[in-house]
Image (cartoon, rainbow, N blue to C red):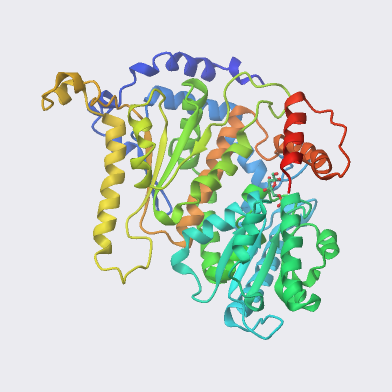
Amino acid sequence: MDITMTDAWRALRAHAEHFADLELRSLFADDPDRVDRMTLSVGDLVVDWSKHRVTQAVLADLAALAETTGVADRASAMMRGDRVNTTENRAVLHTALRAPAGRVVEVDGEDVVAGVHRVLHQMAAFTDRVRDGDWVGATGLPIETVVNIGIGGSDLGPGMAYEALAAFRHPRIRCQFVSNVDGSDLAAAVADLDPATTMFVISSKTFTTQETLTNAKSARRWLVDRLGEDAIAKHFVAVSTNADEVAEFGIDIANMFGFWDWVGGRYSVDSAIGLPLMLAIGAEAFGEMLDGFRIVDEHFVSTPIEENVPALLGLIEVWYRTFCDLPTRAVLPYSRYLHRFPAYLQQLDMESNGKCVRIDGEPVTYETGPIVWGEPGTNGQHSFHQLLHQGTTVVPTDFILMGAPDHTDDQLSGVEAHHDLLVANCFAQSEALAFGKTAMEVAATETNPALVSHRTFPGNRPSTMIMAPRLTPSVLGQLVALYEHQVFTQGVVWGLNSFDQWGVELGKVLALAIVPELTSTDEPALDHDASTNALIRRYRALRP
Ligand code: F6P
């Protein structure tokens, strides 16, 4: 189907011609019920989306677009195990990772939920042993540091969640996350570690990823040099779908935690890839996180579009990106512990929908996935918020905020006052972005007329405010699922396969070809482009 030929698409194009006239000031002035109508709850999340430049007519046509493209049907197909990832011929079942025991979801006649709970039990049993100090290293000492070696989805999800749930961590166990093939990453991580109390979790869905295997081999050398070959069994475990490669690497597959090809890397934080997180926060809290995911899953599949929070937010992003030509989207958590959340969302969103070819192989003729970026507030206020307020591009922004301090720094007296300030700043930013300050308002107090234009805020910059009482495991699960289903909604409307990532392949292949050209003792014959050839020669000259 060519979506651009539908009535809803044409109507939205027509609305977008008047985008400049959609003034938040007027939308609020003309509609006293706007905030009530445009504030929705899902689980513990309260989402105020009233500060978006959308009218009832725009929303109706976005809903029609969702209907025409079959968002609800596609969601059901995904969740029942259809092979919706057609370019890899795979089911997409991250929602089964948080299905309750007893629910049946079948792939090729096999119930996957039973397998999910088998692995969760295996993880929980292992986690309990490590946390209780019953699992000891080669010298008989309990594990104190868990070093996760993985990249992309095998790093960003558990790393983000470990930071987010700092308040729930076991007092003895800390985690480090090594992802980059830059040797400094691993070197810095192990610099102060005692090998006797260190455990490496090698996380890789494929167990063929160059960065992860390079780091894993160096970590193994580091450990064997200090504790000997026999120590591997007590200090290395793996998370993977590839038992053969895990065994080949030298990890006993009894110490491997499995998952399945129907879990995409960027959708895997709630699979065994979450093992370091479970080690840190315990199996019970991990289960609470899964419950949080499930609350939003159930909302997403059972709620009409008009009240379906992830679907609505996804559609509003389609409006901005495709029809209003706004290229980026900022995610600004007003929570230090969510400082890795924007990086996590970058992979979730940009690897899913950063595509210029539709699922049927035809090129898209419209803008798709936005550039996602962000930093926690209030830090960003003192750097890039200048552009958000007065720059020439409009950046739709998500604010994420907790009602209570999301930390246990109770020993810091006056911590509530910090939180009040944090909240005040967050609300002030969304208010300033939306309503700005007109030249007339500035002129009323500014004595120097030359400064009036400089001090004017155009406003009319849209944002969503997502609030929850506190950053608990359940709330984190709800937040992640909220974004997963937004990204899904957008992918369906844009006609994309949000579950493959062919765009990452070419660079990997080229890098493999370049490695021997950098390291060969003989001068290699180079047949890249002139620039790449010159870069290789320059590096060879610099190489120690
Ligand atoms: O290169 C991209 C990617 O395939 C991601 O999609 C994935 O999350 C990451 O690499 C890591 O892959 P693996 O878990 O197989 O090592």
Q: In this view, does 230 lie above or below 4?
A: below
Q: Residue at x 72, y 71 (%)?
A: 223
Quarter containing the N terminus? top right
Residue sitting at x 30%, y 39%: 429
- Taking depth in this image into account, of 215 and 528 the one nearest to the observer is 528
The x and y percentages for residue 135 are 66, 81
Can see residue 49? no
Q: Is 177 situated above or below 284?
A: above
Q: Residue at coordinates 28% horizontally, 63% vertically from top-left?
A: 415
The image quarter in which residue 351 lies: top right
Total marks in image: 0
| Residue 5 position by quadrant | top right
Q: In screen coordinates, is 20 left or right of 110?
A: left
- Hey, which residue is sitting farthest bottom in the picture? 140
Give the residue at x 31% y 45%: 426
330 and 235: which one is in front? 235
Viewer-proximal residue, 389 or 491? 389
Q: Is residue 517 left or right of residue 294?
A: right
Q: In which quarter of the image is residue 462?
A: top left
Give how far across and how far down residue 313 sits, in percent.
Answer: 46, 37
Percent position of residue 144, x then y: 58, 75
Residue 263 versus residue 388 in the image, above or below: below
Residue 313 visible in this rendered orientation of the protein: yes
Q: Position of residue 180 (x, y in %)?
A: 65, 51
